[in-house]
Image (cartoon, rainbow, N blue to C red):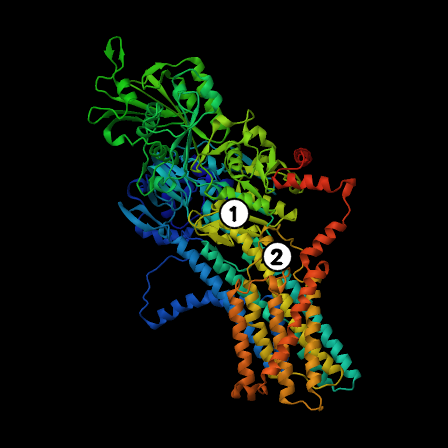
Amino acid sequence: MLYPYSRSEECAWQPEEASRKLDALGGAGGVFYDSYYTRRNHSQTNPDDPRTIPPQNQSTLLTRGRNSADIRSLRREFGANALHGDAIDEPTETTNPRSRCLAGCKVLSPVAKAFYDQLKEPLIIMLLASASISLFLGNSADALSIALALTIVSLVAAVQEYRSERALEALSDLVPHTCTVLRDGRAIENLSAKEIVVGDLVLLSTGDRVPADMRLIDTVELSVNESSLTGENNPVNKISQSLTVLEGGVTTGNGSSDVAPTPPPLTDQINIAFMGTLVVSGRGRGLVLAVGERTEFGKVAKELGEVEARKSPLQIKIDELGRTLAYASSAGIAMMALVGYLLGRGLLETITVAVSLAVAAIPEGLPICVTVTLALGVLRMARHAAIVKKLPAVETLGCATVIASDKTGTLTQNEMTARSMYSPAFPFTFSLTGVGYDVKKSGGFIVRSMSMENMQSENSVESVIMPGQSRVTNQCPEYACLAALFGTASICNNASVAEDGKTLGQPTEMALLVGSKKAGVPDPRPTYHRIQEIPFSSDRKKMEVRCRPVGGSHSCLAFALSAKREESGKVISPDGSVYFVKGMPESILAECQTRVAADGSSVTLTDSEKARALSRSREMSGRGLRVLAMAFGPSLETLSFAGIIGIEDPPREGVVESIRSLHKSGVKVLMVTGDSKETAIAIARRCGILCSSTFTQNSSGDIDPANGQGRCSFDSSGDERLDLDAHSDIPLDEEYGQYALSGRQLDSIGQQYLPDSIAGVKVFYRVAPRHKLALVRALQKRGEIVAMTGDGVNDATALKASDIGVAMGLGGTDVAKEAADVVLADDNFTTITHAIAEGKGIFFNIRNFLSFQLSTSFAALAMESVATVFSLPSPLNAMQILWINIIMDGPPAQSLGVEPVDPRVLRAPPRKVNDPIITRALLTRAISSAALIMFLTLSVFSKELDDGRVTRRDTTMTFMTFVNCDLFNAYACRSAEKCFYELSPWSNPSFLWAMGFSILGQFAVIYWKPLQEVFQTEALSIGDLAFIVCLSSTVLLLDTVRKKFLRPYCSDDSKRRLFRRMKKPRNGKGHAYRKRSKKRLDVGLPISGNSRLIRSRNVASSQI
């Protein structure tokens, strides 16, 4: 049955009304009406309609909760609290054989499904067809080798993807899915969230994760972190009162009016607690409104099925290669059949030879190489704490041209940190080093942010500070003021931080506590008894507590002097208690008449000092910091201003270096966040996404920001700190505003204009999930390969629509991890840099493998074709050809897939998606090598075939020559740029093991009696082996000639450079202009201001 109420109606309910409405769902006799029907007949009173229950019928949901007898029927009517139809976990017996069989099927089923999906790839289908034809024509050896290769490919890919899914399940188990529910008048703790039904009364407390969407019926200072759903970093204060919802109407097709309330935005539903969000402070109770896929969390998960997953660039190129090989094989069969017919051969014999040659030309080792190379890349990524769900995802990152990253929890720590402080006793600000809640891990201390001009111009107590003294300790003259500032922040605080970094409470209050520890101010709360608390409210914009010292002495001198203050000859606070206040600077300064002096005493707060404090507050706010002011005094009428503290969610460790590395390699990084403009621009500036307009080039050619515009500096230990005394006069939102767009601005731009309008934009703020999806599609229309990172439910649809989705494993939601291709198990953004390098290396290694594989296949095909055309006996028998396929398509070829890549390749810009996997240069190398191998092999064969009769020695010498030529060719194919003597033999141990295995196997075939009978070979002398080695080593000479003298024709990279030199400059502008343009592109900013003009024109066009 349909749930009869809309979200707008639920928000407008009073708590008692919510109880009656939801209680009626469980006792309405199974008669339900959908909301559309009841709205059309709202003037009629239906006694069976739960929407029209008389008010006098009192509900017991608020006192006793649901009746256990109604749970099964409610779950049947409105669904279980599970996504994608997951069943409720039921205890099962595993001792009987049937249960064990079912458990085994649950394990094997995903592997079988992945195996089946692998068999649907175009290249795999073509190879299956070739194996079938070979088997039909009696070439069982070819069919067996192809079948074996396909089995290995499919099983490796299937098992790897199954292991990734199991790893994701282990990550989801880290968060317990339990809650506390009131049923039958008693509280049930640790109840599985899947057992929740509509109308359940759930008890929420600090640290709980909300199990379902629920209407709050009573709250006590309840604050919920909804960043995983809305992207808002600050906790939302929840209420239980009803909300006023404006209603609008739509006209139906038959002319009748259907008046339906417009659901408010998620951020405005402050009396609703959403599934998956986290309670950071307070407590409350709520009635469940929606479960499973009907929750806001579940709606996003359901939308994922409507987003079509895109194929990776490697998959597209492999599919194209499969089609090309299919056409080439068909043409080869037709040509050989025609030649055989003209030579007078029988039809069946001609077709058999043609099919055998066509099958031999197909590199059946290619799927194995691609799969094994990707699988090894997955294993290497696992060492960097990254879980790759789909094998092609690793290579796709090598093509990524744009990374659209979420801010909260991805680029930033998602741990608020105190960064900047101001005390009215000093003209400068202070900074705190270190980020995060774990002080032992991050360290940190307080430093001065003062220029030499300030120290020389100020004629006050601060002039005694020497320029070399930067760090503030408890021996410094500023410590008394800072102790009063952080002491107030700690006492007026309800959070707690354990020694191991575990936190409990609101992020802002936790940041204040951690900042106090870094500043060397002990937490004074154990020495105080709290007498009174006036909590923070949006109207008053401040929080007040009144405390009395337990032992009679205060924690710092400023508090002791304040407690002894007198008014009209009497002590204001006889019991020694003091009020501690924190809140918005404007609200606090309006109530302060005095301020803390350098010695801890209270002096008059002048208007100029108030103005200077407000100016510092605006400077901090303009750089994305959340600013709180502190004050204390014996009464609320005699408060002393202690100072202000700026708090931010700082960038993660290593993010700045990673973004700088990505910029150097030609990858653009965009920030997509639901946060405010000021905060988004400030963090983008800190991370390096937005760079200063003034740049210099150092000796190494790297582009660095000018020091004069820096807003971040580093102390002698290398710790980053925020320096507000080294700022530009232009606010960040004005200086970089042209590179930012809001979600509302995106809505005003038509979809057809969006790709052009976002050119040059680096920051997107106040965006909703629909905006992220629109941005991904707009970037893809511009020809970009988009990697989207995120951790929240609001990122899920964009993660799936992007070319590669990257989710956070620890802080990410289950929906985001399901939609992503790669999951970062440690939530480290820097892992993306390793993944991009891994992806670039994989593609180049696959090209090297193809160069070797095609040269081997072409040589075999050409050798057999020449023998067929000239009616010569076959140089190799069937078993020898099969052995060549096994030993050449096996270890040596596969080891090329793990060859260490040249660092120049890793620093190169991302390859274009339309770059072919087989280029003219690659074909040139393959064909030239195949021609030389064929010539050398046939030369040996003709030399040995002097008596006109094929003997074992003839085929053995030919066989050994072909294999040795291939081994030397494999060594040359390790690099497309370096000659064989420039390669280190020890850089790829896998290749050495593979070569050793192949050589030992070849010697066994030649010298071991049992294998001699199978392969029809005989032992060769030392002289024969020396002759073959010298002859086949000429392959290395050919490779050296290609790389040294024919580089423009045999090197893909040189070919691109040759074509770029041949292009004429446009508009008569030469090399100098292109160089200047490239330098401006490297900093990540638009070349001109045309982007703003384009956006303005597109907004106007979309509104016409």
Where is mark 1, residue-wise?
Answer: 789
Q: Amino acid at mark 1?
A: Thr
Q: Which residue is mark 2?
A: 313
Residue sitting at x 52%, y 86%: 1008
Q: Is residue 422 above or below residue 314?
A: above
* Residue 969 percent across, percent down from the top left: 63, 70
Q: Position of residue 864 (x, y in %)?
A: 69, 80
Disc 1 secondary structure class: strand
Residue drawn at (33%, 64%) of the image: 92
Residue 105 spot, x, y in % from top left: 42, 68
Q: Is residue 807 visible?
A: yes
Q: Residues within 10 Å of mark 1 (few under 14, many from 20)?
A: many
Relative vertical location of residue 279 with respect to residue 904 in this rendering, above or below? above
Of residue 483 and residue 109, the one placed in the foreground of this image is 483
Task: Relative to 311, say whether 367 is above or below.
Answer: below
Q: Quadrant of residue 145?
A: bottom right
- Residue 898 lies in quadrant: bottom right
Q: Is residue 1054 left or right of residue 801?
A: right
Q: How many badges with numbers are in the image?
A: 2
Using the numbered discs, state the Cα–Cα distance from disc 1 to disc 2 in whole angstroms: 19 Å
Q: Earlier in the sequence, mark 1 or mark 2?
A: 2
The percent coordinates of residue 475 (x first, y second) are 32, 26
Number of the label disc, if any, that sits on residue 803: none
